């Protein structure tokens, strides 16, 4: 198969070598330009994401427990590692809150967890989560 392609293509290459050379160079330059544009766009997006993370104060790495709490020994062990420059513990807890309000026409479309009815009014309890963050300000720089 390869010899047949070489046999058929060699006559065209010999008779029109200028066109073959120009087409080969054009295709090579087009592929190189497409790759360069892709690499430049990817680099710009990575730099922008890194700058936004720095501005927002996000950590480069986070150590989280899969279930429950992270043992304090793990934090101490991480701090004693020579590759860690700075670390600050952060505690993040979601606390459920319950807000009671009078039922109205707009509340009937919302998801509710508990409804109590008295002789005069109807109150609806809606579960709301409050995110509480605890930060050690003496370690955080």
Image (cartoon, helix red, strand yellow):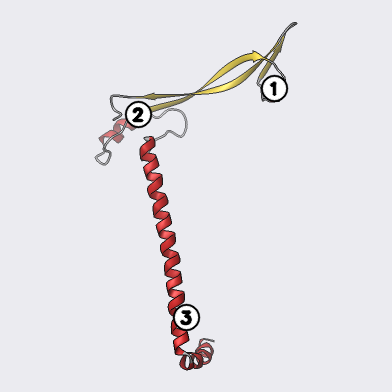
Q: In terms of image quadrants, where is residue 110?
A: top right
Q: 31 above or below 38?
A: below
Decide: marks 1, 3 in contact (CB < 8 A)?
A: no
Query: In this view of the protein, which residue sits in the foreground, 128 or 40?
Result: 40
Label 1 SS: loop
Judged left or right of residue 70, residue 124 is: right
Query: In this view of the protein, which residue sits in the foreground, 69 or 56?
Result: 56
Q: Can residue 26 be seen in this view?
A: yes
| Label at residue 23 | 3
Decide: marks 3, 2 in contact (CB < 8 A)?
A: no
Label 3 SS: helix
Residue at (39% x, 41% y) in the render: 52
In the rendered image, the quadrant that contains the N terminus is bottom right
Q: Position of residue 6 (x, y in %)?
A: 49, 89
Q: Which residue is under mark 2?
A: 89
Query: In this view of the protein, which residue sits in the foreground, 104 or 3?
Result: 104
Q: Which residue is under mark 1?
A: 106
């Amino acid at each position: 198969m390869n010899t047949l392609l070489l046999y058929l293509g060699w006559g065209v290459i010999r008779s029109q070598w200028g066109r073959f050379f120009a087409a080969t160079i054009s295709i090579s330059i087009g592929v190189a330009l497409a790759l360069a544009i892709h690499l430049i766009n990817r680099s710009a997006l990575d730099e922008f994401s890194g700058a936004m993370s720095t501005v927002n104060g996000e950590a480069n790495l986070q150590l989280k427990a899969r279930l429950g709490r992270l043992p304090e020994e793990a934090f101490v062990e991480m701090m004693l590692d020579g590759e860690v420059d700075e670390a600050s513990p952060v505690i993040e807890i979601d606390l459920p809150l319950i807000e009671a309000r009078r039922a109205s026409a707009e509340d009937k479309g919302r998801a509710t967890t508990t409804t109590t009815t008295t002789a005069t009014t109807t109150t609806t309890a809606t579960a709301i989560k409050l995110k509480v963050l605890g930060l050690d300000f003496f370690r955080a720089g």
